[in-house]
Amino acid sequence: MRAMASTAAHWKQQTSAGALDRLTERYAVTARLRSRLGSTFSSVRSYSTHFPLDETPISESGAWVNGAIDGIDWHDVVTKNGVAHGALSTGRYTDPTALLTGVWGKNQAVKAVVYSRNQTERYYQEVEIRLRSTLAAHSCTGYEVFWRCLETQNAYAEIVRWNGSVGDWTSLQKHTGTQYGVRHGDLVEATIVGDVIRGYVNGEEVISATDNTYTAGSPGMGFNYGVGETNVDFGFSYFEVDTYDD
């Protein structure tokens, strides 16, 4: 895990000078979040990346599994020019998905920096963080916290549970409105501690839900299906995870 100061510097490089004050505030909130978790739990495993490689699909030396190669029924995540985004997708609910491999702590805190251009009402451009998830042939389970890349009243944030097969998912909470959408450079975060799932935008909690179906699994990311060739217009430019056990 790179030092927090280095992470903050990366955010500054990815964002215009006029947003540095907002980034400093985000960094402080995130540091407090990590400190709160760290004072309660023992760290199990961490990971961070700014996607330095161009890969189809993302691997980073075997660190990730993907929706098509490993899950078969979904699509893969691609990295190019420092951005992770979904592959071109077809089929309902076949979201491009990538999960980190190996064993992770059950209490998970993930943050990612949003990449977004050419926002449109035509498609549902969603950036998604996965928690306590698994991916195998014809099966994808776990929790997903996601935000629409849009700044109108049709924006939303939602938390869902994936139950296994394609199209089998359960919405746990959803909020709609301008304040729930995201734009380029925003910091999104998702945490699960015990059975409580929370989502944040720029350090502010915007959504939460409670569910006790899954007690273990991997963190990861995903992007919505069926967005045509705009799949390259939204993604993440940075991803970081800390996981903890009781």
Image (cartoon, helix red, strand yellow):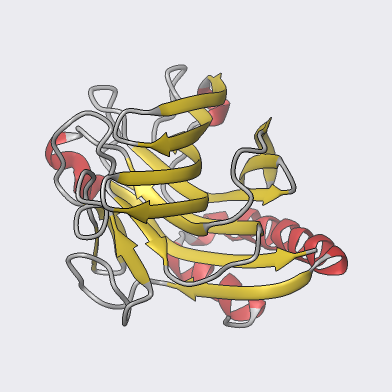
Tell me the residue at 67%/49% (across/down). Answer: 192
In the image, residue 178 sits, relative to residue 66, either above or below, namely: above
Left or right: 132 in relation to 206:
left
Q: Which of the 4 quarters of the picture holds residue 90?
A: top left
Q: Split into 4 quadrants, where in the image is the C terminus?
A: bottom right
Q: Nearer the viewer, residue 165 or 83?
A: 165
Residue at image coords 32%, 64%? 65
Count of numbered marks:
0
The picture places residue 103, in percent across and down from the top left corner, at 54, 70
Extreme residue toward the right, this view: 39
Which is more toward the observer, 70 or 90?
A: 70
Q: Nearer the viewer, residue 58 or 181?
A: 58
Image side of residue 205 versus residue 136, left or right? right
Q: Residue at x 46, y 60 (%)?
A: 15
Q: Nearer the viewer, residue 148 or 117?
A: 148
Q: Quadrant of residue 208?
A: top right
Q: Is residue 144 visible?
A: yes
Q: Quadrant of the N terminus?
A: bottom right
For residue 114, say whether it is visible: no
Residue 205: x, y in percent?
A: 69, 39
Residue 106 versus residue 140 in the image, above or below: below
Residue 120: quarter of image: top left
The vertical placement of 245 against 125, above or below, is: below
160 with respect to 192 (left or right): left
Q: Is residue 54 above or below residue 160?
A: below
| Whole-percent x, y for residue 59 in the image | 29, 73
